[in-house]
Image (spheres, helix red, strand yellow):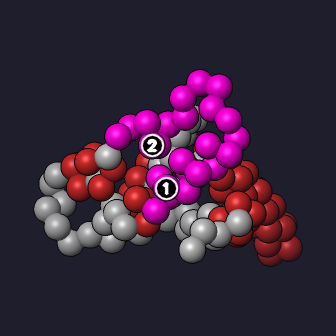
Amino acid sequence: MLQPPHSSLQVADVPHQRVPVRDRNQDAPWHTEAVCRRDEAGLFFAPSKEPTAARLSREETAKRVCARCPVMVECREHALVQPEPYGVWGGLTAAERRVVLARRRRRDMELKKAARGTIAAAG
């Protein structure tokens, strides 16, 4: 069942630390196990001047592919660290990744501010 677009943003905030999820050959790059390697790249990247309804449908289809991928977390983290400006990576669109990155920056600033306050209070 498809989720409304706003609900995906609520679960898009992933832990800042990289979470290892695979026990397979750790020497192989994560992307060698990506499910999307078997799908058309057009599913994950928008054609120019794509109508909104078509984009939303394509992105939901791409997210369903991501949901069954064994390296989704690694892919998502790669797209956030790079940062990848286009496409669906790790089950997130570019807009959703911008939201996650903004939340991380805000959280990091709050943690630094709290740490400075703790140091000042201890001094």
Q: Of the residues shown, which amino acid type is indicated by label 2?
A: Leu
User: Mark 2 or mark 1: which comes first in sequence?
Assistant: 2
Q: Of the residues shown, which amino acid type is indicated by label 1?
A: Thr
Residue 9 placement (x, y as % from top left): 69, 63
Q: What element carries label 1?
A: helix
Can you identify the residue that label 1 sits on? 61
Q: Nearer the viewer, residue 36 or 10?
A: 36
Q: Which of 65 and 50 is in front in this view?
A: 50
Q: Are marks 2 and 1 in contact (CB under 8 Å)?
A: yes
Judge whether 61 appears above or below 51 on screen: below
Judge whether 93 appears above or below 108 on screen: above
Residue at the spot x=65%, y=65% of the render? 8
Residue 68 placement (x, y as % from top left): 37, 67
Which secondary structure dominates the residues rendered in magenta? Answer: helix
Can you identify the residue that label 2 sits on? 43
Residue 24 magenta-drawn? no
Residue at the spot x=14%, y=62% of the render? 25
Residue at the spot x=40%, y=59% of the render? 65
